[in-house]
Image (tube, coloured by chain):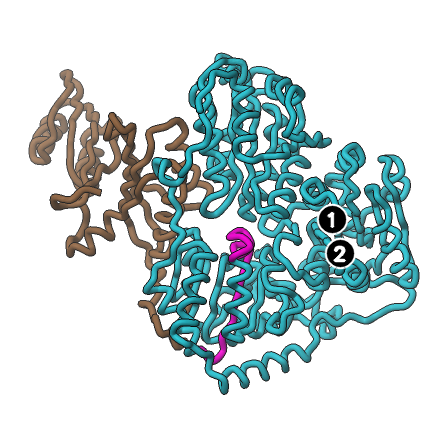
Amino acid sequence: MNATLNPTAPSVYFMADVSDKVETHTLSVLVDNEPGVLARVIGLFSGRGYNIDSLTVSETEHEKHLSRITIVTTGTPMVIEQIRHQLDRLVPVHRVTDLTVEAQLANQEKPLERELALVKVAGTGDSRLEALRLGDAFRATVIDATTEHFIFEITGRTSKIEQFINIMKPLGLIEVSRTGVAALQRGPEGL
Amino acid sequence: MTREMTGAEMVIQALKDQGVDTVFGYPGGAVLPIYDEIIQQEGLEHILVRHEQGAGHAAEGYARSTGKPGVVLVTSGPGATNMVTALADAMMDSIPLVCITGQTATHLIGTDAFQECDTVGITRPCTKHNWLVRNVDDLARILHEAFYVATSGRPGPVVIDIPKDVQFATGTYHGPTANPSAAHKSYRPQLKGDAQAVRAAVELMANAKKPVFYTGGGVINSGPQATQLLRELVGLTGFPITSTLMGLGAYPASGDNWLGMLGMHGTYEANMTMHDCDVMICIGARFDDRITGRLDAFAPFATKIHIDIDPSSINKNVKVDLPIIGDVAHVLEDMVRIWRTSSMKADPAAMKVWWEQINHWRARNSLAYKPNSDVIMPQYAIQRLYELTKNRKTFISTEVGQHQMWAAQFYGFEAPNHWLTSGGLGTMGYGLPAAIGAQVAHRDALCIDIAGDASILMNIQEMSTAVQFGLPVKVFILNNQYMGMVRQWQQLLHGNRLSHSYTDSLPDFVKLADAYGGVGFRVEKPGDLDGAIEEMIAVDRPVLFDCRVANLTNCFPMIPSGKAHNEMLLPDEATDEAVANAIDDAGRTLV
């Protein structure tokens, strides 16, 4: 998808240059928690060739049967606008908010984003001690252990989790399970 | 009103409460309870098709020609999968369809039972919404919701998958809600355009030097009022107007401001006007690749206004300057009112210059073709068909290919809802069932499917439906023994290697018509054409009209893929060499 406005074209409502730069955005989607709703959302992304970097879903308002889906996606601004409108078009979707845009409008760098990971590390001797020491430094909690392994629970921004996992690699990283990003807009208002 | 009844009874009751008079369908194991109700009632006519895809396209033809939703009833498994093409077609062209499918009993779902398939899974990407009804007490609500979703906002197809045990079960039925939009949890399309944006659009229009209206199927979907308002606005402004394939008829082809269709096989004047315009008012169209040609050279000087009910149509392919989200009729009503009350006027000097330029392009006569007294030119056949049917109540449907483009170019549409064609999906086999659907809704009208010899064979079995229900549809086959459009692209792109685009062993269409209980005609000479068309019209039975046309004629003008609006290939310039070199490397990968 290329820029379609000729920058020299006279335009009363001249818009900022269409940039082809790929951006990462976090979208919050409020949906009816009904069978198939997640398939609709995922099918939309695969069918139209959009990216999903992370997807998190859970029922968040039990009495109304509403779920909140948090999607981290990448694309050009035009594609991200498309994603938002295409999601909004799905019948069981109540609301789509681009949290990244909302944060920018409020002069914040990013929306509040957190992720949880369970990280299994096995080893003995020095590397085992080092893993424990680093876990401490990252404020990870040991939630399972034998003399040969630890499972750390770590919470934080995606970048912190990535960093922790990378550091654990040479220290006997076995496997990782991650929740994906949960995100909210800062401040007192809701969606 | 609430009443206890079975699920199958609810289906019939809900259809009647929604004002449905016709259902197109085909029975099977998983819908037998509903069929058992159909035969015991009056007021709902069931048209038995010969293939489920035919039911889908017939319902589309019914919907497009009436403005009402088309209703389809098919069984589970293959019944549902055979509907998929029609659903995808309706999805692309925004046609309201309510498709009811039977499903295996709930306790069998997931066991690979006989004629089981994941209908909601398969149809999810080609419907506006779909439902699997697991509880009979949800059925009435879902049936009414389905009609609301199919017909409101940007219309589209919906599927209601009803397991057989739910059809047998007894539950509580309730009628439609008075205000389904207010009652719906999440789906409430915006009808009214933003007032400031509408005013800004009108001001842009008043200041335009080279304006153009570019309209689409959304005008027709919005209803007769939108068509009236569009004509009024064109009259008030004096601007030129062109339309997509789907929008033909919204503005009359005989109107003074009409430029003809635009896009790949549009007229030279329509495409040049689009390319050079300074203000483009896009109304209910979606900047499809068949319309825009090369994107980075699309209307490079234009300030673009885009009116559409679907926000996802805005900025999808082309970045627009002034989007207005709303229903076409609502927005046009505001535009006309502002134009009138503010005593707006188009710049007369600029408009004079602009029309002179447009008339210069018109004089290029881009639809011209060489007449022939020995063989029937396909364009001539359409022209004669038009001349001999234009004073009747006529509905035209088409299949897909060259004949479709010639029909769009040479048949003049004066009113909306009289042109039924598969635009977005390009479904060969659409035309005959669509004509049947239109004929069911308009028994006294002349319903003609303009077809190709290849396309017609894709749903030829529906001749049997037409005969059974006394539907005198006329199939006007431009028979050139080729898949003409495929061949044309092979000439353009593949060094004239005509891989499998020639059809040998075509049936004898006259005998075929006879075999189905219809009437067949064959015409080979231009001099015999008028008489045969008149005979065809006079016949009160389904007709296959085998019109033998010049085999190697190609469809021009044409914007080769990857080219811009001002790089059209015109008929008199389309030499073999020009055709062979028309598409460059960048355009080769485009469809």
Disc 2 residue type?
Arg
Give the labeled residue for mark 1. Answer: B445
| Chain B palette colour | cyan
In which quarter of the view is residue B293 placed?
A: bottom right
| Chain A palette colour | brown
Which residue occupies 33% across, 59% down?
A21
In which quarter of the view is residue A141 placed?
A: top left
Is the residue A187 above or below the residue B529 in the image?
A: above
Is the residue B566 above or below the residue B357 in the image?
A: above
Q: Foreground residue, B459 or A113?
A: B459
Give the labeled residue for mark 2. Answer: B392
Q: Which percent across, then down, holds residue A185? A: 18, 45
Which residue occupies 44% across, 54% down?
B327
In which quarter of the view is residue A155 placed?
A: top left
User: Range of the magenta residues?
Assistant: B208-225
Give the numbered dot on residue B383.
Answer: none
Disc 1 residue type?
Ala
> Is disc 2 surrounded by few (<14), some (14 to 19) or many (20+) residues within 10 Å?
few
